[in-house]
Image (cartoon, rainbow, N blue to C red):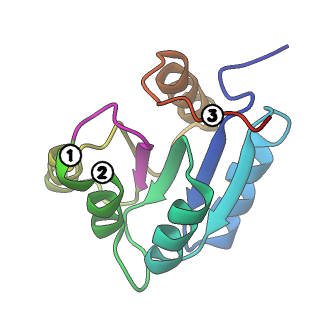
Amino acid sequence: MATALDGKSILVVDDDPDMVTALTMVLDGTGATIQTAGDGNLAIEKAAQFDPDLVILDAMLPKRSGFLVLEKLKGASRKKGSRPLVIMITGNEGKRHQTWAESLGVDGYFNKPFRMERLVERMEQLLANGTTLHKPQPA
């Protein structure tokens, strides 16, 4: 059965190997192409090379924070719905970080711990809404 994730490219960015493993296991079998990065600088490099439809981004990362990565990914537009779509995940419970992420154009925000089903549902909603630009398919 096809899902909204089928054929999409997803970049998972988190410095916690257990979280990366859990996310990639949940996404395995969805038809999405998955790449991972363990720090903010690598996330920027992988995003440039991989050109993902969606990024799952930890807020607290080594080398470059998730907020700086989000700012770089969303660019000057800082617009929700612009490609790549970004869902931020964080252990910070305060509203200040969520407000900051929203001002930078984040498309979804989850506090850890969260139910993986809810994250996947949000990913499917974002990708099904057609808010991503369609990349040309190779001939």
User: Number of numbered discs present?
Assistant: 3
Span colored in magenta: 79-89
Left or right, 79 with reference to 115: left
**Label 1 sits on what residue type?**
Arg
Closer to viewer: mark 3 or mark 1? 3
Q: Quadrant of residue 4?
A: top right
CA–CA distance between discs 3 and 1?
24 Å
**Label 2 sits on what residue type?**
Lys
What numbered label is drawn on residue 74? 2
Task: Tell whether label 2 touches label 1 (CB within 8 Å).
Answer: yes
Dot 2 or dot 3: first in sequence order is: 2
Q: Quadrant of residue 38?
A: bottom right
Closer to viewer: mark 2 or mark 3? 3
> Which residue is depicted at the point 55% across and 17% down?
128
Asked whether residue 70 is in view, the answer is yes
Dot 3 or dot 1: first in sequence order is: 1
